[in-house]
Image (cartoon, rainbow, N blue to C red):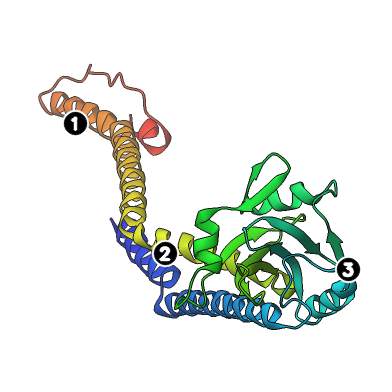
Amino acid sequence: VFMALFGYTLLHRNLDKWFSTPIDQVVNNVGLIVEEISKDARIHASRSARFLAANPAVGGLGAPAEGRQDEIKSLAADYEIGLVLFFDGSRRLSGIYQTGEVYAPGHPQFQAIADRLKLVAWNGQQGHITEQAFNRLINNAGKKEITLDATDEKGQVMVLAGATVETGGFEAPSSIVIGYKIPGNLLRLASEISQSSQDYKGRAKDRPRVRDNLMLQMGLITILIVFAAVWIGLYLSKRIAIPIRALAEASNEVSKGNLQVQVDCQAQDELEILV
């Protein structure tokens, strides 16, 4: 009983330490940090897309022009934009910039890059931005910071944002979609931290179940110990009680004058000498 009470107290103290208030505060703060990192990344991506769309090197273009490719590469490098998709006024994918290279529709990797982002629907060799992606990334007046998540060729998470490029005149405006990767895999690390926080919160909710399971285990151990103690006690008591009972009966016979009585009983140690 003492062991059970001690274990019960120790268990509750450990549970309180495992799910203490400081740890809960740390988990909540980590969640806020993750949200801020993600929010800043999406704001940066949206603003970079609008800035690039308004730049003279891109303005008025439905596709990356030969004479301005170097300028586009320089702008993308300065603003850490690893990917740019160019769509003309008919929403057709007309060019792709990725990590210092510009790909035309006839390039072997052109379709592979676009397919990885899941933004383009293909009709033969021509690809058009999907209606859902267009409405979310391009046609989002009044919802400036609307973005999507995607992965690059290395599996690193990046944020997609879009903007409209005014072509001037009566032509339909073209558009661009950029991919911004947070330096140092911060978004991936933030996602892992967020997942760990969610796992911790899930375990914290299971605290009563963990306590009940541990208490059940302690109860079973206590019962086994009590059973073993009772069995050992009975065994030891029989080794003492049976010879003493036999001696008592023999003494009673001697008191009656029966001097021929013999004690036929197995015993050990001092009881054996007495028998």
- Seen in the picture, residue 187 relative to 255 is either above or below; the reply is below
Q: Amino acid at mark 1?
A: Ala
Q: Nearer the viewer, mark 1 or mark 3?
A: 3
The quadrant holding residue 268 is: top left
Pick the residue in front: 239 or 101. Answer: 101
Mark 2 crowdedness (10 Å alpha carbons): few <14, some 14-19, many ≥20: some
Q: Identify the disc placed on residue 248.
A: 1
Residue drawn where x is 54% and y is 61% of the image: 134
Q: Can you give x and y, in whole percent of width and height, for residue 109 in the image?
A: 82, 49
Point out the tag, 2 or 3, that comes first from the N-terminus: 3
Q: Which residue is mark 3?
A: 66
Residue drawn where x is 86% and y is 75% of the image: 68
Point out the tag, 1 or 3, that comes first from the N-terminus: 3
Q: Can you give x and y, in whole percent of width and height, for residue 162 in the image?
A: 61, 70
- Position of 11 with respect to 163 (left or right) is left
Separation of marks 1 and 3 at Cα, in angstroms: 119 Å
Q: Label 3's element? A: helix
Q: Which residue is mark 2?
A: 201
Pick the residue in front: 112 or 67. Answer: 67
Q: Amino acid at mark 3?
A: Glu
